[in-house]
Image (cartoon, grey):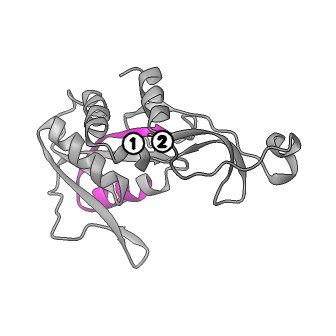
């Protein structure tokens, strides 16, 4: 899939929304990404994950790992597309870890997948878990890279869509200056 196709699908499902948004950080933004608006559609999730898997088809991936929550869906579908096992990490006492009897045998070639990356914090934590278990990270696959490509995981990294989303403090927000009301982030339409 080309980035234009990915963006069109995400906009159609309102996973990418345009307007005037108040972010959890307190900053304002003209764009908001709500991954679950697309991930709630299995046929779209499968299509996106097949495209993501194609980027790593030649990397001899033996295991796909994603962090809770959206990463679970992506790991499952990418693992299915690559014909391999898929597991997920989750937090225990604030630390990313493997639970539920999941194992990463030493030397296993691992692909990490994540839905949305802004700072890469969760992915870095997953990379640490894999290394702690002796796994060999062959790459990182992302649905959306909100960092504009600024996050460097020091391994092959492929995003289906790269966005450089502007954010503003309320005092310098151009949308506020124009008197634009905040856009509701809930799903409307489709």
Q: Residues within 10 Å of mark 2 (few under 14, many from 20)?
A: many
Residue 167: say if magenta.
Answer: no
The residue that label 1 is drawn on is: 38
Residue 108 location (% of width, % of height): 17, 49
Marks 2/1 in contact by CB < 8 Å: the verdict is yes
Q: Residue at x 31, y 36 (%)?
A: 44
The residue that label 2 is drawn on is: 15
**Residue lying farthest bottom?**
93
Q: Residues within 10 Å of mark 1 (few under 14, many from 20)?
A: many
The residue lying toward the viewer, choosing from 76 and 141, is: 76
Q: Residue at x 16, y 62 (%)?
A: 103
The residue lying toward the viewer, choosing from 40 and 142, is: 40
Q: CA distance from mark 2 to mark 1?
A: 6 Å
Q: Earlier in the sequence, mark 2 or mark 1?
A: 2
Which of the 4 quarters of the picture holds residue 132? bottom left
Q: Is residue 124 above or below residue 53?
A: below
């Amino acid at each position: 899939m080309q980035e234009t196709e990915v963006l069109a699908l995400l906009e159609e499902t309102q996973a990418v929304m345009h307007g005037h948004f108040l972010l959890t950080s307190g900053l304002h933004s003209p764009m908001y990404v709500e991954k679950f608006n697309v991930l709630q559609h299995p046929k779209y999730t499968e299509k996106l994950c097949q495209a993501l898997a194609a980027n790593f088809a030649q990397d001899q991936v033996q295991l796909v790992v994603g962090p809770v929550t959206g990463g679970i869906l992506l790991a499952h579908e990418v693992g299915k597309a690559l014909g391999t096992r898929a597991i997920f990490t989750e937090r225990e006492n604030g630390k990313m870890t493997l639970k539920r009897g999941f194992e990463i045998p030493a030397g296993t070639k691992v692909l990490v997948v994540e839905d949305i990356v802004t700072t890469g914090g969760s992915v870095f934590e997953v990379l640490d878990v894999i290394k702690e278990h002796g796994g060999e990270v062959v790459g990182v696959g992302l649905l959306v890279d909100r960092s504009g490509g600024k996050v460097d995981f020091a391994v092959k990294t492929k995003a289906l869509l790269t966005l450089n989303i502007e954010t503003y403090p309320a005092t310098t927000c151009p949308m506020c200056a124009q008197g634009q009301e905040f856009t509701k982030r809930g799903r409307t339409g489709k």
